[in-house]
Image: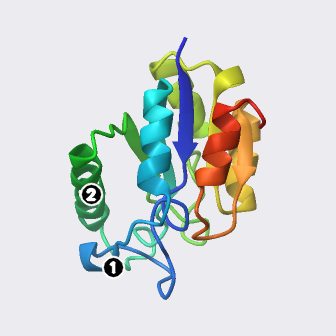
Amino acid sequence: MQKAIFLDRDGVINSDIGHYYIYHVKDFVINEGIIPSLKKFTEAGYKLFIVTNQGGVAKGIYTKDDVNKVHDHLLCILRKENITIEKIYFCPHHDSVAVCDCRKPSPYFIKKAIQDYNIDPDQSYMIGDSLRDKQSAEAAGIKGIKVEANENIESYCDKILKGEL
């Protein structure tokens, strides 16, 4: 079985300072510590996944194509650093428009990855900046770590790799 790190996007991987929604490549800024942390996780044998709510799609603020452009931009940056994201799961729904099964705090996408990629929940973590990220992780049977928005996650990375979390 594989061990995995699941990451929220906005506020964890990229800065969301000054923007409630990030849907333009020009507004996408990777947070400090992400590249070194993802490299360490990769070198330690973790599979990497992104699980993100993108409710602005349901609200008509931006489109799935906008989300995919931002994700393509991120994946291009990470490829240059020899970092592979196995899959990006994103929920385009919002509770104010319609209820769905995939919006965090639902564990839907994490459970799907566990099944599809033979992930060992006991060796896997979700790093997010909201309570719903942690709730999603725990409902899927993995460890959830809540960080502050836009916080450098390197110290959490190091603690995971040392077995301290």
Q: Nearer the observer, disc 2 or disc 1?
A: 1
Name the quarter where the C terminus is drawn: top right
Report whether 102 appears left or right of 72.
right
Whether label 2 touches label 1, CB < 8 Å = no
Q: Quadrant of residue 30?
A: bottom left
Q: In the rendering, at what x and y percent does residue 124 appear?
A: 64, 29
Q: Where does residue 108 sit, x and y in percent of width and height?
A: 59, 38
Secondary structure under tag 2 reads helix
The residue wearing badge 1 is: 27
> Is residue 104 at least partly visible in the picture?
no
User: Within 10 Å of the Cα at label 2, are there few (<14), some (14-19), or many (20+) other Cα atoms?
Assistant: some
Of 151 and 2, the residue lying toward us: 151
Residue pictured at 69% horizontal, 67% vertical: 148
Q: Which mark is residue 106?
A: none
- Residue 68: give its label: 2
Considering the image in quadrants, where does the N terminus appear? Answer: top right
> In the image, residue 90 lies at what x, y percent?
44, 51
Location of residue 84 by image quarter: top left
| Side (left or right) of 121 relative to 74 | right
Instruction: Please name whichever residue, 90 or 93, is drawn nearer the observer in this view of the structure.
Output: 90
Q: Report the number of discs.
A: 2
Residue 33 in view here: yes
- Sooner in the amino-acid sequence: mark 2 or mark 1: 1
Quarter of the view holding residue 87 = top left
**According to the image, what is the colour scheme of the structure?**
rainbow
CA–CA distance in space, label 2 to label 1: 14 Å
Q: Is residue 129 above or below residue 84?
A: below
Q: Amino acid at mark 2?
A: Asn
Is residue 114 positioned above or below 49 on the image? above
Residue type, numbered disc 1: Asp
Q: Residues within 10 Å of mark 1 (few under 14, many from 20)?
A: some
